[in-house]
Amino acid sequence: MHNSYLNYRIILLLNLIFLTCGGEVENLTSTPVPTAITATVPVPVSVETPTPMQVPTATIVPTQIPSPTTQPRPTKTPTTKTVSLGAIRDNTIYEDPKGEVSNGLGFHLFSGQTKKGKQRRTLLAFDVAKALPSSAVISSAELTLNVSRTSSDAFEFALHRIVQDWGEGDSDAARNEGDGGKAEVGDATWLYRTYQSVLWASPGGDFVKIPSATATIDDLDTYRWLSTSKMVSDVQSWIEDPDTNFGWAIIESGNSNHSTKRFDSRENPSATYRPTLIIGYTSSD
């Protein structure tokens, strides 16, 4: 009886619980225990921390400013030129034992030997350094003189380079000038380079014995001493060293009697007949 009462109370308790929960208990059954749900927790993926990229430091390169290029100057092609020069001084020296005869201002020049065997020699010079550039290369040189009085025969006359300075004073011969006039201070004479002050080393003038050129002179006419290598060399040396320019002496080659020729000087009234030096040269100037 005691067990029955206990069972009765258990059933009442269960019904009470059920009613409280809103339902009736017909049969007491065991409620299944819900299966535990295993939640899948995502495993954190190891994310590799990116390595910072190294940005290269910019190198400042200085701007190269090109140096100005020097353009080569075009080389001038040398051109051949010709120039005609008049004498800057001339004179005649007359063979005279005292050396007192000259003709600095005369209209004429003389060269050769008189009937009595007395010699005359023409001296003349040209200022080539003033007329030509210092870079000039001489290719030709030709001397022109006019003969205004002559003996009947032809004779050879040579150009000899003078090696000492000489003068042209104020002497002026009379008449046809063949005998010369009284020498004045500064004149060249047979004995003096400059009258009464400086003597020649040798009477009759100091000159190179080997002629630079020759020409055969005959009747009245204009004559040329044509270009030779020695004439070219003479003129070239006067360009390169003007202080050695003393010109030429015109001397009759054979010391022949009665061979005298009269040339017109730079003082001659007719410019056409005056001595002329024609020079051919090249220069880059």
Image (cartoon, helix red, strand yellow):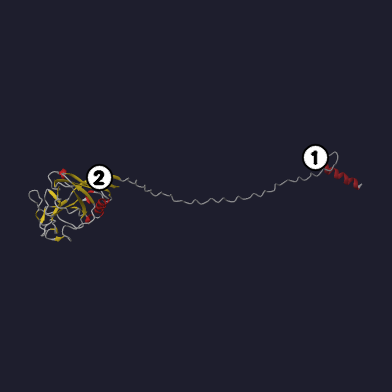
Does dot 1 land on a helix, a strand or a loop? helix
Compare residues 151 and 186 and report the one nearer the observer: 151
The reply to whether residue 17 is in sight is yes
Q: Is residue 74 above or below residue 99?
A: above
Please give the label number shown on residue 140: none
Would residue 264 be visible to someone looking at this image?
Answer: no
**Front residue of 261 and 168:** 261
Left or right, residue 174 beside residue 284: left
Query: Which residue matches tag 2?
Result: 82
**145 displayed left or right of 67:** left
Is residue 30 or residue 18 the one in the foreground?
A: 30
Task: Name the residue rendered at 81%, 41% in the picture.
Answer: 18
Q: Secondary structure at mark 2?
A: strand
Q: Position of residue 122 (x, y in %)?
A: 16, 52
Look at the numbered discs 1 and 2 and tell me whether their residues touch, using CB distance below 8 Å: no
Point out the tag, 1 or 2, that comes first from the N-terminus.
1
Which residue occupies 88% across, 46% down?
6
Query: How many residues crowd mark 2 within 10 Å: few (<14), some (14–19), many (20+)?
Result: some
Residue 177 x %, y %: 10, 50
Place residue 204 in its image quadrant: bottom left
| Front position among marks 1 and 2 | 2
Residue that label 1 marks:
19
Along the line of sight, which residue is nearer the eye, 96 or 256?
256
CA separation, marks 1 and 2?
A: 152 Å
Residue type at tag 2: Thr
